[in-house]
């Protein structure tokens, strides 16, 4: 079985992520969307909520599984029997970051490769940070995220605004 992981924080999961997951699932038998639980950046949603949002977004899609993980990505890939890590590229600065990360991961485990997929043109501007910023300022992100993620963002920012 050709198995890969698609790791990230997915805070929140957006249409760019969905595009990469769908396309990877056409190339591999199983794509494990690996939701990282403890990144060094601050998060809007807790790990369980992020996993649930991703699961709902990929519901009904064959060859895609959602799993949470912590620790080194290459160690998780090896643990689940994946031979590669799938990453999405939007702009040149993504390439530079992903290139360095791929080299570091290869140094840690030379059996795990990195496969970069260029995002669909309509998603080149999308990032979780951009979605969060727009949503936090009351902007409409409904064209950027699945409807259930949009609802979760609206609810979360309402909660945060109540706390102020």
Image (spheres, helix red, strand yellow):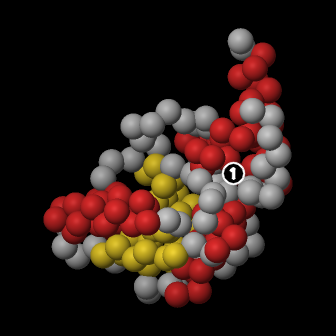
Q: Position of residue 114 (x, y in %)?
A: 35, 73
Position in image of residue 164 (x %, y %) = 71, 12
Q: Is residue 59 left or right of residue 84?
A: right
Q: Quadrant of residue 19?
A: bottom right
Q: Is residue 121 above or below residue 130?
A: below
Q: Is residue 38 left or right of residue 71?
A: right
Q: Position of residue 112 (x, y in %)?
A: 28, 73
Residue bearing mark 1? 53
128 on left or right of 114: right
Please, what secondary structure does the residue beneath circle 1 have?
A: helix
Q: Residue 68 at x, y = what percent?
A: 50, 52
Identify the residue at horizontal 55%, vertical 42% (top origin).
47
Residue extending furthest toward the front: 92
Q: Is residue 76 visible?
A: no
Compare residues 113 and 67 and report the one nearer the observer: 113
Tag count: 1
């Amino acid at each position: 079985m050709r198995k890969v992981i698609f790791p990230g924080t997915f805070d929140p999961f957006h249409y760019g992520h969905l595009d990469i997951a769908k396309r990877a699932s056409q190339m591999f038998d199983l794509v494990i969307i690996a939701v990282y639980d403890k990144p060094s950046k601050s998060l809007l949603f807790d790990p369980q909520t992020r996993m649930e949002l991703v699961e709902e977004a990929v519901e009904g899609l064959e060859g895609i599984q959602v799993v949470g993980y912590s620790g080194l990505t290459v160690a998780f890939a090896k643990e689940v029997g994946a031979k590669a890590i799938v990453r999405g590229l939007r702009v040149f600065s993504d390439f530079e970051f992903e290139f360095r990360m791929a080299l570091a991961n290869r140094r840690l485990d030379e059996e795990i490769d990195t496969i970069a997929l260029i995002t669909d043109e309509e998603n080149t501007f999308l990032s979780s940070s951009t979605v969060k910023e727009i949503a936090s300022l009351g902007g409409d992100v409904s064209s950027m995220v699945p409807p259930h993620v949009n609802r979760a963002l609206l609810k979360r920012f309402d909660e945060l605004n109540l706390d102020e």
